[in-house]
Image (cartoon, helix red, strand yellow):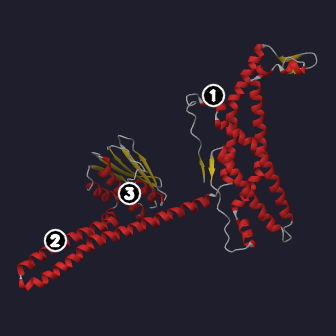
Amino acid sequence: MATAYGPAPDTRLSHVPAALRAPIEGRTWREFAYVLTGLPLSVLFFCLAVSFTALGLGLVVTFLGIPLLAATLAMCRGFGAVERGRARGLLGVDVSAPAPVVTRHRGTMAWVGGVLKSGASWRHLLYAVLHMPWATFTFSVTVSLYTYAWGLFTYPLWRWVFPAYADVEGIQLYGDGRRNFILDSPFEQAVTSLVGLAFVLVTPWLVRGMVQVDRLMVSGLLGPSRLATRVSELESDRGVVVDTAAADLRRIERDLHDGAQARLVALAMDLGLAKEKLVEDPQAAARMVDEAHGEVKTALQELRDLARGIHPAVLTDRGLDAALSSVASRCTVPVAVEVDLPSRPAPAIEGIAYFTVSELLQNVSKHSGARRAWVEVWRTEDRLLLQVRDDGRGGADLAGGSGLAGLAERLGAVDGILAVDSPAGGPTTVTAELPWRG
């Protein structure tokens, strides 16, 4: 997966328009260096890749052809590592390395088969073949543009070379033996310098556009495939789901052990004592039974709360509108709930949406200092959107330790997104996006 990054811009030039500072920016000279180094490397990679590929194909009828092709592809993967490093250092494009060659068995032939079956290896070979003509083109155009641009711009400084060594007064634009047009007057020199300045200002943008093609080639051919990237994301999401499920199970176990279970154990002991005193002291036994009755009610309420925390019955029976209204009624600030859904999403998505809003409203109660909050739920195409707003003090952050980071991970495990807009002083708006999956 490609990620663009780069050094912070020079604040000394930040007030200069981009069109004027481009010729002297560090980015421009790094791109120029990328083009200059690209031609010799691409020629070397092209010659080696084509030569060994042709040799391997020519020897494919023998035992040596297949291993030679595999070695050529492995060599091209090495070329790709060099190109990714060059792009990272000069273009500011961080391209992840493709997945290594995977083999089910050990041994040389298993490795050969793994390399030949690897799509990433063949993409590296394709890059070595395609990049050479493009690098030749960009090198020729870039060097020509820079040479003419800076040469014309500085023409008044080096015009003395012509009368001193070429016996002419300046650059000759036209000559047929009878009539010559030479740039030698002060006015012509000034015009030439202005034309050169125009090229100096335009050339970085032209080179930047050509280098953009290199960025696309590096990220498209030398990085992991979209399928491999997606598999990696799913593996990471699966880990998040497993960890979340394990944490929920531990929480449920802890709540049962410390809450309802402990209360029921105490209740059983109280009823045992009441049974023993039933004949000796009926009034004391009645008081103990009455206390046990209160404990039963408390235990039942704790079990209901625990069941509601796992999956509330109101959500199953009546959907998000009623369930979120119930959550809002328990918030410490007034909450306006608006749910506009044409139908109900998949139960799993509905449950995630419920717990997302529930946790966000808990944050409002505990951390925001708000006086009011608003909850809105709606559908846009195949996405379910949730938005929780409050008029509190703001300053919420995904890295602020308020549970938002964990919530973002849970949403990401189902291809969801969490966006937080919470400037200091408020208001805070948290928007969650989930797949519909109805």
Tell me the quarter of the picture where residue 26 sits.
top right
Query: In front: 239, or 431?
Result: 239
Residue 411, percent across and down? 45, 58
Tell me if residue 191 comes above or below residue 103 in the rendering. Answer: above
Locate the N terminus and report the quarter of the image it occupies: bottom right
Q: Label 1 neighbourhood size at 10 Å, few (<14), some (14-19), many (20+)? A: few
Residue 203, percent across and down? 70, 32
Tell me the quarter of the picture where residue 275 sits.
bottom left
Residue 146, percent across and down? 75, 32
Of the numbered discs 1 and 2, the one sitting upstream in the chain is 1
What's the CA distance linking mark 3 and mark 2? 34 Å
The amino acid type found where label 1 is placed reads Leu
Give the residue number, with chain letter if any, for mark 2.
Answer: 294
Tell me if residue 203 comes above or below residue 124 in the rendering. Answer: above
Q: Residue furthest right?
A: 177
* Residue at position x 35%, y 59% in the image: 320
The amino acid type found where label 2 is placed reads Gly
Tell me the quarter of the picture where residue 384 sits.
bottom left
